[in-house]
Image (cartoon, grey):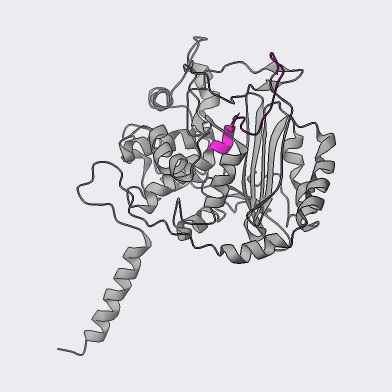
């Protein structure tokens, strides 16, 4: 009777350990209810000791000297070890009034919004409402694309067609503003050809994160914007971060305008109403709050965050890759950057993190300038010395 007791005990322990890895959805819960704890694990004392060794004045001077000739019309925030080293507002917020940028200026994040959408999906996964292996047919039963999982959306391996391209073939009315549901209906009605079979290669595609936003709505039973506000913006104190609505006439304090070329204001676009892949406005200070939260489990458990920071595409060798809502870049010294870039309506942005060195670089630009991206390596050299990427291949995710 007792000879199998040890085996039974061991089995029970294994079941308990496995069940703890992913939290179970609360019973009889019609709306989202967070079950994961929010405990800060980070050792602030050791970080403070490292921060105290930084020569802030010298670093700030070197960064300012390096960035001066780049011509950025941007707000910039650079930090290390939880200490802000450099922050600056330079340029024009509104060319028609010549209003200057201020620290509380808000910028369209463009594709950096994908980081926020990815985190929102991970919150649902972390709390047992959604699974990485869920088929998208579970949420869109009539969608004519099979064998695509939530995981494939998060790491751009779905093979879905990009709505920013195919929608122009079917929408001819100039003043049309598409919504997420419109994108879904276009996919169902016209069945535009997929790019490739699911999970066979990487292809960056805005449709993936538009669908994720709609899945978040269906699972949480609340508007995507409300879920993100309640689960990310409000808890982190991101008071100057919000979603853009083309039809919204509300005057937002600090809102900038986007420009291209010789101060030509970017024109509205039929895709402006689609959220998930873009559409968030924020400030450098608010994005820094998000950055710091990613060193803790305030948003998502540390174990799931580490999964999000792992590369998911290996068809081609290279230093660049993509995780769950984050771009990844591997350096020769073994460290990896976790970041995302954005570009939409004259805005281009960088949300760059080097976790091993607690380095944060946030650049929000409202007049398109490629130096927004090209400046990152120079800033890193100032903060940590020259280190090359492990290997670069144009075919790898970027």
**In the figure, 10 relative to 287: above or below?**
below
Q: Quadrant of the N terminus?
A: bottom left
Residue 261 position within the rendered picture, expressed as x and y whole percent measured from the top left: 75, 20
Residue 8 placement, left or right of 333: left
Give the extent of the magenta segment. Answer: 95-113
The answer to which of 115 and 89 lies nearer the viewer is 89
- Inspect the magenta stretch and tell me whether residue 100 lies in it: yes
- The answer, for residue 106, to whether it is visible in the render is yes
Residue 57 placement, left or right of 240: right
Residue visible at 41% across and 56% down in the picture: 38
**In the figure, 216 relative to 275: above or below?**
below
- The answer, for residue 203, to whether it is visible in the render is no
**In the figure, 111 relative to 95: above or below?**
below
All told, the count of numbered labels is: 0
- Inspect the magenta stretch and tell me whether residue 331 lies in it: no
**In the figure, 223 relative to 376: above or below?**
above
Image quadrant where residue 120 sits:
top left
């Amino acid at each position: 009777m007792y000879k199998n007791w040890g085996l039974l005990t061991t089995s029970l322990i294994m079941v308990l350990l496995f069940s703890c890895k992913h939290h179970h959805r609360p019973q009889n819960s019609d709306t989202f209810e967070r079950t994961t704890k929010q405990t800060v694990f980070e050792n602030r004392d050791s970080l403070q000791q490292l921060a105290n060794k930084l020569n802030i004045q010298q670093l700030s001077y070197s960064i300012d000297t390096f960035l001066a000739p780049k011509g950025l019309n941007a707000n910039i925030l650079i930090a290390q070890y939880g200490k802000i080293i450099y922050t600056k507002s330079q340029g024009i917020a509104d060319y028609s009034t010549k209003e200057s940028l201020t620290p509380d200026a808000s910028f369209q994040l463009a594709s950096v919004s994908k980081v926020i959408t990815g985190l929102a999906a991970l919150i649902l996964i972390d709390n047992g409402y959604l699974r990485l292996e869920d088929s998208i047919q579970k949420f869109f039963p009539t969608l004519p694309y099979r064998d695509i999982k939530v995981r494939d959306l998060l790491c751009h391996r779905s093979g879905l067609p990009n709505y920013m391209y195919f929608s122009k073939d079917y929408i001819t009315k100039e003043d049309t503003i598409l919504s997420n549901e419109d994108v879904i209906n276009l996919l169902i009605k016209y069945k535009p050809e997929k790019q490739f079979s699911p999970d066979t290669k990487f292809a960056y595609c805005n449709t993936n994160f538009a669908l994720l936003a709609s899945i978040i709505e269906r699972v949480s039973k609340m508007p995507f914007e409300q879920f993100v506000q309640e689960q990310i913006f409000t808890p982190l104190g991101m008071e100057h971060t919000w979603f853009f609505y083309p039809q919204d006439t509300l005057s937002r304090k600090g809102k900038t305008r986007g420009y291209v070329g010789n101060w030509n204001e970017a024109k509205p676009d039929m895709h402006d109403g689609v959220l998930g892949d873009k559409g968030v406005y924020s400030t450098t200070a608010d994005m820094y709050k998000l950055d710091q939260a990613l060193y803790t489990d305030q948003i998502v458990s540390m174990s799931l965050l580490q999964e999000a920071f792992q590369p998911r595409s290996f068809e081609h060798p290279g230093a660049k890759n993509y995780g769950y809502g984050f771009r990844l870049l591997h350096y020769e010294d073994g460290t990896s950057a976790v970041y995302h870039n954005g570009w939409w309506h004259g805005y281009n942005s960088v949300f760059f993190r080097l976790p091993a060195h607690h380095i944060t670089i946030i650049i929000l630009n409202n007049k398109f300038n490629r130096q927004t991206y090209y400046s990152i390596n120079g800033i890193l050299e100032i903060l940590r010395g020259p280190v090359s990427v492990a290997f670069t291949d144009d075919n790898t995710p970027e």
